[in-house]
Image (spheres, helix red, strand yellow):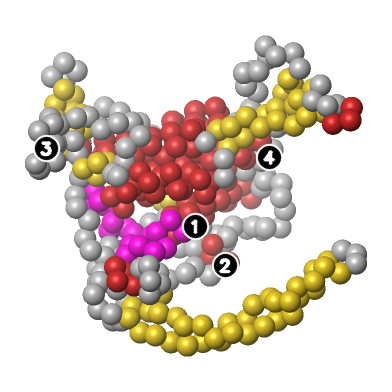
Amino acid sequence: MRPLPAPALAALCLLALPAAAAYFGLTGREVLTPFPGLGAAVVPAQGGAHLKQCDLLKLSRRQKQMCRREPGLAEILQDAAHLGLLECQFQFRQERWNCSLEGRSGLLKRGFKETAFLYAVSSAALTHTLARACSAGRMERCTCDDSPGLESRQAWQWGVCGDNLKYSTKFLSNFLGPKRGSKDLRARADAHNTHVGIKTVKSGLRTTCKCHGVSGSCAVRTCWKQLSPFRETGQALKLRYDSAVKVASATNEALGRLELWAPPRPGTPAKGLVPRSGDLVYMEDSPSFCRPSKYSPGTAGRVCSREASCSSLCCGRGYDTQSRLAAFSCHCQVQWCCYVECQQCVQEELVYTCKH
């Protein structure tokens, strides 16, 4: 995988593919152009600057109109693509396909398990980022979550600004386009996986409380809704990827429309079933990703763990061993007052990389 330079990561441009459920994330074909004045202020860009940011993003016409109506949205969309990319790369760091941008556009045209994960993690990142942006005051049309779930308890009060997941999911239903009614199997699978990403973020919504009272008593508790860290969402989606369901299409005669259907596995007597709402679904078996192709750069030169991943990652080609010196902090002591002082130590370590 070719890592993006830091300035480029701060300037991600997005592409929405014209499908029934729009993919929202990086495809590898974007021109990474910095926003005007990006990073100069925390306050969302206003006026002409905001409109220019929307024009720099590669959006559909309808999405661009939505972006232009909402100051601050362009930067939030950019943050969402960044978050989805980093989480995908973390979850697949030890896999043959490591969520590289190289080959991404070709992979998005297929129905692999990896395609399913990309749709899910991109919609999850957008859901998460938008809900957090509302509670952080980065949006004009939304604010804190005002869920009254604990009003019946007089000692509990809603006080701290909660993540507005209700607004986030409602916005996405319009932004990502229609998700139902398509007669194309691929479009229905993409829509299903997009919904899995949104649903996974919803399942991570928690109630967080703080106590207030004399001498540490909990006479009054202030509570708010808060999303779990996105790393937990990424881990949940990776588990769904590992157990993804291969589907075909079947016509629902009662409703007169195409439905996803999971054929029975060979050797099992069970009949085919409709996949569960939380299952990631795919239609095609994935390539090995061992050699460079239009879907990935292959695994040659990848760093691996000799005990854990070299055998699988290097695809039987073996690995090279190199020795290098690595610096690390050591002999750390707490100084009065109040900082930690460390020495720099150097040790030799072995690095294993897959052979070409």
- For marks 3 and 2 on the same chain, the one whose residue lies earlier in the sequence: 2
Q: Earlier in the sequence, mark 1 or mark 3?
A: 1
299 above or below 56?
A: below
Marks 4, 1: nearer the viewer: 1
How far apart in space, not on screen, are marks 2 and 1 (Cα)?
12 Å
**3D distance between C-alphas at marks 3 and 2:** 50 Å
Q: Which dot marks residue 140?
A: none
Q: Which residues are magenta?
A: 90-112
| Badge 2 density bin: few <14, some 14–19, many ≥20, Cα 10 Å | few
Residue 61 visible somewhere in the drawing: no
Q: Residues under labels 4 and 1: Cα distance?
A: 22 Å
| Label 4: which secondary element | loop
The answer to whether 80 is drawn above or below residue 206 in the figure is: below
Image location of residue 114, percent across then percent down: 31, 53
Q: Amino acid at mark 3?
A: Thr
As measured in the structure, the alpha-carbon distance from the residue carrying label 4 to the one carrying label 2 is 24 Å
Numbered badge on residue 136:
4
The picture places residue 251, in percent across and down from the top left corner, at 14, 26
Q: Which residue is mark 2?
A: 6
Name the residue beneath numbered marker 1.
Answer: 86
Q: Residue at 26% of width from left, 65% of height from top?
A: 289
Q: Verify CB contact (< 8 Å) between mark 2 and mark 1.
A: no
**Disc 3 target residue:** 268
Q: Position of residue 109 (x, y in %)?
A: 26, 52
User: Disc 1 marks which amino acid?
Assistant: Leu
